[in-house]
Amino acid sequence: MYRTVNSPQGARIQLDGREVINMASNNYLGLASHPQAIQAAKDALDQYGVGPTASRNIVGNFPVHDALERALAEFKEVEATLVFNCGVSANTGVIPFLVGKGDVIYSDALNHGSIIDGCRLSGAQIKVYEHKNMSSLEGILKEPVTGKKLIVTDGVFSMDGDLAPLPEIADLADRYGAMLMVDDAHGDGVMGPMGKGTVDHFGLRSRVYVETGSLSKAFGSAGGFVAGSKELIDALRPKARSFIFTASPMAPCLAAAALKVIEIISRDKSYVDKLWENREYFANRITKLGLNMGTTVTPVIPVIVGEEGLADRMSQELFERGVFAQAIKFPMVPKGTARLRFMISAGHRKEDLDLVVNAIEEISKANGLIS
């Protein structure tokens, strides 16, 4: 059964009838319930109604969709973007557009499931390289190919909180004539200057062929998008099946909320700064406890406990102490690496984080993880 939220998303939520500190949401900047975003959604409801009721290429395109795509392109510093109804649809739409039968995809072993599905739908040959292992990637890139080559990777890996080595991947893409695609769902609004993303964090804007992203995480709304050249987006628009064979990708009210959030963070970097301040504070306290955080360098912070039963038990014990952190298990992560995943937000107060760490320390001692 699902746990049920009875409040707006925030640092504290009403979950299954009790107030808890929310450490499981992707609401990185704490803007999912920002008053200006809520008002923008209400205004769009009054102006455009609830649902679009048709695909954008028929009668489902509203001015707010076009405005959102322009704002996203400006934020991401690309020529154009195309909005989809979710990140899954963005990946399953753009990958089969880029490659097909006779082509080869090179995919990181820990890529998100939506990337894997997009690769399978393409009909291209899929070659998987060891996670972040550039020798493994180069080894398969050297193998002869007659068709196109596409390297695809997450920017931020959502189970471990680590970063793809994009500079090295870009070098290999150039060397072996491959297109480079980055899914930055967990990097947008988080990484790089003003939260522009992992590609900008590494200064690789001109070397990445296409990006996909999410509007349901740091941007606090819903939807996904593809970002790239105008030529790419113009060609993708009439051909991406997950775009053309669905009602307009976003209800106008959701598009309006996402647009407002982009406007907010484009002029005010304090949200991104606060997110990283909280991230460093929390990570330092967890490190001092001696718990295993793996290789994280982002606001996705796992506490790896190993056994699935232990992860479930600790998640429940935290909940009983007023903290919700999700237990992550196989097949989301490899067997033997079950964990609690803590998602840091700019909305968390220091007092919240202290309460969470104190609860983690208490249950970790009780379960023999630390002394």
Image (spheres, helix red, strand yellow):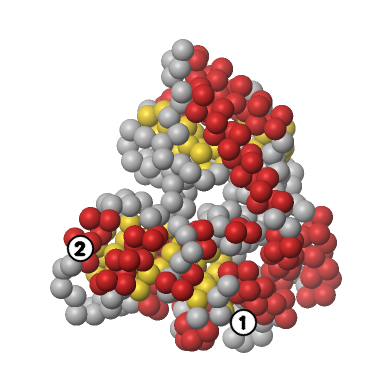
Q: Residues within 10 Å of mark 1 (few under 14, many from 20)?
A: many
Q: Which quarter of the picture shows residue 53?
A: bottom right
- Whole-percent x and y of residue 250? 64, 70
- Residue at 38% in and 77% down: 98
Q: Amino acid at mark 1?
A: Arg
| 70 over 38 or under it: above or below | below
Q: Determine the residue positioned at 43% across, 51% down.
A: 163
Residue behind mark 1: 56
For numbered disc 1, what is the local secondary structure?
loop
How far is disc 2 from disc 1 in space, using C-alphas?
40 Å
Left or right: 49 with respect to 107? right
- Residue 43 image point, x, y percent: 83, 68
Q: Which residue is mark 2?
A: 140
Visible in this render: residue 69? yes
Where is residue 73, by image quadrant? bottom right
Vertical side of 28 occupied by 337: above or below: above
